[in-house]
Amino acid sequence: MIDLAQNTLDGLFLGSSYAMLALGFTLIFGVLRRVNLAYGPAIMLGCYAATWVHLNSGAGLLALAAVAVLCTTLAGAYVERLCFAPHRQGSAIAAMVASFALWMQLEELATLALPRHIYPFPPLHGGTPLEFGALTLRVESLVMLGAAVAACAALWWILYRARFGIAVRAVIDQPGAAQLAGISVPRTFMLTFAMASAIGGLAGFLVAASHEQVTPMLGMMFTLKGLLAMMLGGLGSLPGAVAGGLALGLLEAHSQWFLGPQARDLIAYALLFILLAARVPWMTTRSAS
Amino acid sequence: MDDYAIGVLTNIGLVSFLALSAYLLLIAGEMSFGQQAFFGVGAYAGGILTAMYGWPLPLAALAAMALGALAQLLVGLPTLRLRGLYFAMATLAAAEMMRILFELVHFQRAIDGEAVGPDGTQGFRGIRWVFAHGVEPIEYLAIVYALLVLALAGFLLLERSRLGATLRGVGEDPELAAALGVDVNRCKLGVAAAAGALAALGGVLFAHHNTYIEPRNFDIMLGVHSLAYALIGGLGTALGPLLGVVLDIGALEGSRVFQGYRMIVFGGLVALLLVWRPRGLLDERTVRWVKQRFS
């Protein structure tokens, strides 16, 4: 019983990092109708930049977080310019394959700067985990959950209360009409991309801090988990992305505990396959061709 | 030719089967992230049949191709109605499930006092049919390319035939094709079976070239690479995917000029190339232009 509660908690914390990644994917997919495979590697580059700063200076955690967010955003802007701006009207497959090419590029850039397989990353909180009765909580997990909630709140405020958000939603729903109404569609794309990258950079920093290490596998992990969470929650829906991220986290925490790490991934992919094959209504509402 | 050149050329040939498999699905309008799974099915099935049960390689290759076709049909039946990203993600999910299953399979037999067979994440070593039957690397290279030429001839015949036109029609606009009386679903299932068999053939050849395979060989990187090869080379002709493979493995791996910076150079070039030619170097327009000039 206590295991079940502990797993549920761990799953929620894990899921909040997935939810942030899925939010970034969904923002990009929502406005562009394109998949950005280089999203994870851009975040990884941000984490590597923060690690490099950490190894070469005595910068504090806040400075490292700023470096991660900034570098992810720069990498994201580069991906947008090279892969998505030229293919705005054209082929979705070409944009996606171009983003895969940049995935390879960003990953190699990161591993050229820091070639070892593992580098240490400073933890947010060096001390022992907090204990509540029989449950243990890591400070990193609480910060992750807090960051995810803050990111969702900020995103909600921007999208539903700020003027810029009206433009973004108009572009998502009716790009042609939005353009006619005087909204600059390219500028909206660029800013949305930057927003998505910033959320991803923050998530990446928190994941690296809670793993206390960075490895070259991070890029693929961020992309796959973000895509999986986005698809589970329904393509292009922001509340769906949060729900999909949390569901994926809970599913992984429980299946890892009961069945082991290989079964964890197997079950997540099997669930995605079955839901897609069954064409459950919430997953097939948006056009994705 | 030295061994290194033979190795690189053989690799180009092997991966070309996978690129052709991705290409076949692309012209029929489906983008797969999962062709590596059927490459893996071919590699494991072929390896098991020759190394554990003593089958001759040609027979094992045929069986592996049949299995690859069957596997892709099984994945395709529930998913081929999905469009675009939905299909891509469904194939990715299927392929990752397959890779994890390869990690879970422990199935070994004692051959000459040595345990042979897939051993989970430890991989599957000792697929030595080629070596044991005295096939020289240069001969194996010739076999791989003979099969590739055969596959290409099949593709070129297909492109000239009514069936090829039908497939491109299904890829361009399935509703219109259906309205013209094409059985879109049957068409796509046929394409899926052929693509699975092609990928599996590549896998069998890969396993017997390397003599060692492990689940990690068949991860998503391989699948997205094959998709990229098809798109870089061009969707106008079956020679396109081959050009993509040659450009990546051949020119860059072979020359070693950009060692350490290979993906930085290549990744940037691919992204720029796709800005200039979103359907690849040998796209439909180029192919049509060449045909008009030389016919």
Image: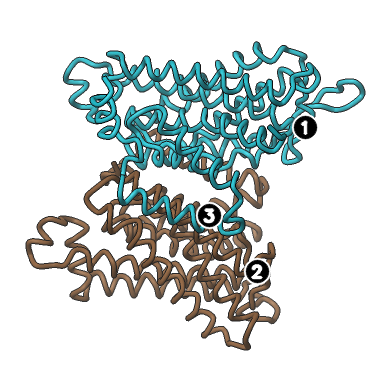
Chain colours: A brown, B cyan
Dot 2 falls on which chain? A
Q: Nearer the viewer, residue A59 or A244?
A: A59
Give me the residue at 67% from left, 70% from top.
A119
- Residue A55: x %, y % from top left: 65, 80
- Eyeballing the image, is A142 above or below A258? below
What amino acid is labelled 2 in the image?
Gln
Question: Which structural element holds mark 3?
Answer: helix
What amino acid is labelled 3 in the image?
Met
Q: Nearer the viewer, mark 3 or mark 1?
A: 3
Tell whether label 1 touches label 2 (CB within 8 Å). no
User: Dividing the image into 4 quarters, which one contains the N terminus of chain B?
Assistant: top right
Residue under disc 2 on the same chain as residue under disc 1: no
**Tag of residue B125:** 1
- The earlier-in-sequence mark between 3 and 1 is 1
Q: How many marks do you count on the picture?
A: 3
The residue singled out by tag 3 in the image is B263
Give me the residue at 67% from left, 76% from top.
A129
Residue under disc 3 on the same chain as residue under disc 1: yes
- Eyeballing the image, is A71 above or below A106? below
Give me the residue at 36% from left, 54% from top.
B272
Question: Which structural element holds mark 2?
Answer: strand
- Residue A239: x %, y % from top left: 34, 59
